[in-house]
Amino acid sequence: SIGINQLAGNLTVTGNVSAPGNGGISLTGVASVLTVNGNVTGGSAANIHGINFTGTSGTITGNIQGGRNATAHGVNTTVTLVVNGNVTGDTGAGIQTTTSATVTGSVFAGAVGAGILNSGNNSLTVAVQGDVYSSATQNGIVLTGTGTQVVNLAGNMYNTLGRNAIWCPNIFISNAATSL
């Protein structure tokens, strides 16, 4: 695990990022670009994220796991994010975002936390190339903000015990996909 609090500039990390007591990475530069080649895991205390990021854009090549607290997310971001891996919720969300995200892997709900979450007043699009899974108690993707929110799904939706895999007002599913 690493602890970095950087106010500006680009940052490339090769290795896993986890959130110990003070968090993993906090990058808040306006023109910052974040690249992570490794897995990201949220913390176990309130608001301790694996990555807390505001800037220009971010790319994570690895899996993202939510934290063990409802407000401890794997990634908490306000920038366009590309994830080349899977995203899984835990007690906290895998990704809490206020802007668009693209996931080339699959998205999994945790028992409490969604894989991807947004409840703010913003318009955004989440594109998932893989599948989206709910748990018995949580949706895989939850986009409930007041802006125009869209999920573009190329893979399949797997609902559990009547819980929808995706909770969003606008869902576009590939013709090849199925909902199970």
Image (cartoon, rainbow, N blue to C red):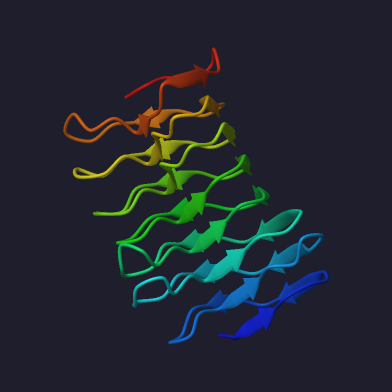
In the rendered structure, the answer to whether residue 4 lies left or right of residue 74 reads right
Residue 162, image x, y percentages: 18, 29
| Rendered view: 137 above or below 161 | below
In the rendered structure, the answer to whether residue 125 lies left or right of residue 72 reads right
The residue located at (64%, 69%) in the rendering is 38
The quadrant of the rendering that contains the N terminus is bottom right
| Most foreground residue, 94 or 72 | 72
> How many numbered discs?
0
The residue located at (65%, 81%) in the rendering is 5
Task: Locate residue 164: give its quadrant.
Answer: top left
Residue 175, image x, y percentages: 54, 12
The residue located at (79%, 63%) in the rendering is 32
| Most foreground residue, 119 or 64 | 119
Residue 92, image x, y percentages: 35, 60
| Rendered view: 105 above or below 95 | above
| Most foreground residue, 150 or 123 | 123
**Taking the image as drawn, is residue 177 in sight?**
no
Residue furthest out toward the left: 161
**Taking the image as drawn, is residue 120 in sight?**
yes
| Rendered view: 96 above or below 179 | below
The residue located at (57%, 31%) in the rendering is 123
The quadrant of the rendering that contains the C terminus is top left
Residue 6, image x, y percentages: 71, 79
